[in-house]
Every structure is written in structure tokens, then in C-alpha cells.
Amino acid sequence: MTERLHEYHSVTKANQHPLLVALCITGSIAVVELIGGILSNSLALIGDAAHMFTDTLALGLSLFALNLAKRPASQTRTYGYLRAEILAALTNGVVLILISAYISYEAYRRFIEPPQIQGGLMLVVAVVGLLANVIGLAVLRSHRHQNLNVKSAFLHMWSDAVSSIGVIVAATIILLTGWRLIDPIITIVIVVLIMRGAVGLVVEASNILLETVPKNLNVSQITSEIKAIKGVKDIHDIHLWTITSGVYALSCHLLIEDRMVSNSAEIVEKVNQTLSQKFGIGHSTLQLECQECQNSPVCHIEGKNR
């Protein structure tokens, strides 16, 4: 477990720099788009600026969570603050959904009463915003699979980039045709794309908080590997969950051959070695038994059914 946590903290430290870069980019572009939206009278740009300001707050929350996660464990928080990043990711996902609801409302208003827009200024500011988001995405891209918080930040910037593309398309059509209804139409497309990522993020974070089995691990396969270890007769009451991104834990009952306690340590070592090397599980709690615990009400869940 110590080795896995050390690896986690190393990854966390590495993730702070790209998040800080993304925070600076998003905050700066939000100011630029707000000013551009006011000068061009573009509600699309003002709405996108509000979107980016919210993303700036979300990135700040992500950085705060990463710093909090590095705090050591205590008597009252034996896992430390590792779940802080999951809570932040869940919050970010919910915020994205709320943003989508707000954008949908704005789209409805624009269908009823399309605003007058200075398409030229709108186009220039949207292009600048897109270029900045592309740079931010490039910074976060290689880190997004290591950490759920970075993934949420990546989704925020991706939704910003999509929004900028939508604004560019709308501005171009307005300049060429004067058809202002394209603005709410593009907005609805943006909402659908944002919601797709946001719902997936909320589901993933919720699954971790509900301690479901990590999607990249298979309980049946783990059970088979453990049963193949010499001295292990059976395995039951197996529980597998994610503590935080990339840190997995497992607990189970092992039915082993009757032997001296000192000799049982060899089995425990082999099981832990298998769990760590083949499945990346760095923390395990193994209860050894020499006969089945048939009378226990909590030992009726077989590994194959988990």
C-alpha cells in the first residue's frame, strides 16, 4: 500500500503543473471573451465567458483537491484525504450539467428573440478562445487517464473548445447570411456534447464513492488467479474497490490448507504479489481460514458472483 500511495503522490505532483497552466489559460480567455462579448453585444460570447469562468473555478477546485489529497492519514481519517479528488471531480461534473442547463435556457431565449451581434468581433474573439483551449487540451491530454480530477479538467476545456468552435461557426454564418437563429441551434449541439461527458464523469465518480468494482478489473479473473496459488483451497467474501484514481483495495477470506501460522505467511506474500503485479492492487486485507465459515451471515457472497 505504501508503494502504491507513493506512486499516487508522485503522479499527483506531476498533475499539478498542467492543471495550473490550464487554470491560467482558462482564466485569461474568460476575461478576453467577456470584454469581447460586451463590445460585440454577443450573448454567445458572454455565455461562453461565463462558461470559462465556471471552468476556472472548477480547475481551482481541482488544484485544491490535489493538494488536500497529499495530506497524511490520521487517527480519524485512516485513508487521509485521497477521496478529496473524487469529490472535486463529482462537483465538476455536476457543475458541467448545471452549465448545460443554463446554456439551454439561453438557447431558448435566443430562439424567441435573436440578438443583434457584431459578427466580425465575435469571430476574432472566438478564434482566440479556440486557440487557447487547444493549447490547454494539449497540456492536459497525456495526464487525463492518470487522475479523475485531471480528466474532469480536460472535459471542461474540451467543452470550452467545442463552444468556441460553435461560436466561430455561428459568427461566420451570421457574417455571410445574417441568419441569427444559427446561434441557438449551435448552442443546442454544444449542450449535447457537454452533457455526454459530464454525465459520464458523474457516473464514474459516483461509482468510486459507492465502492463499485473498478471497471478495468475482473473479480472472476482475480479469484481464479488466487485459487491457483499453492495452499489456497478457496476464496469467498471478496470485496474490491477504488480508494482514489489508480489506488485499488481488496479484502477477502482465504480458505487455506491446515498449516502452522508461520507457514501461512508464504501464502499471504504470494497472494499480495499476484494482486500487485497482475492487477495493480496495492492494498489487501486477507482473512485466513482452515475451514469454511458457514455460520457467518456475511460470508455467503462467493467471488464468482461479485
Image (tube, rainbow, N blue to C red):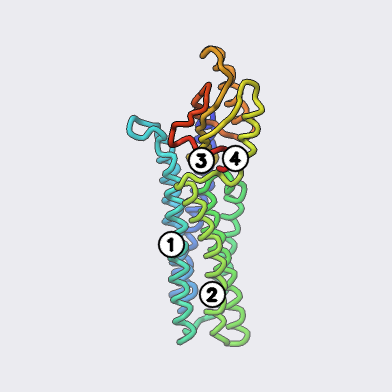
The local crowd at label 2, few if under 14, some if 14 to 19, many if 20 or more residues have their Cα within 10 Å, is some
Q: Residue furthest left?
A: 76
Mark 2–mark 4 Cα distance, whole angstroms, equals: 45 Å
Compared with 160, 225 (above or below) is: above
Q: Amino acid at mark 4?
A: Lys
Q: Nearer the viewer, residue 216 or 305?
A: 305
Label 1 sits on residue: 53
Instruction: Classify residue 273 by image quadrant.
Output: top right
Q: Are marks 2 and 1 in contact (CB under 8 Å)?
A: no
Instruction: Classify residue 66 by image quadrant.
Output: top left
Q: Sequence-wise, which precedes: disc 3 or disc 1?
A: 1
The local crowd at label 1, few if under 14, some if 14 to 19, many if 20 or more residues have their Cα within 10 Å, is many
Q: Amino acid at mark 1?
A: Phe
Mark 3–mark 4 Cα distance, whole angstroms, equals: 16 Å
Label 2 sits on residue: 188
Label 3 sits on residue: 241
Report the residue at 59% width, 69% height from top: 165
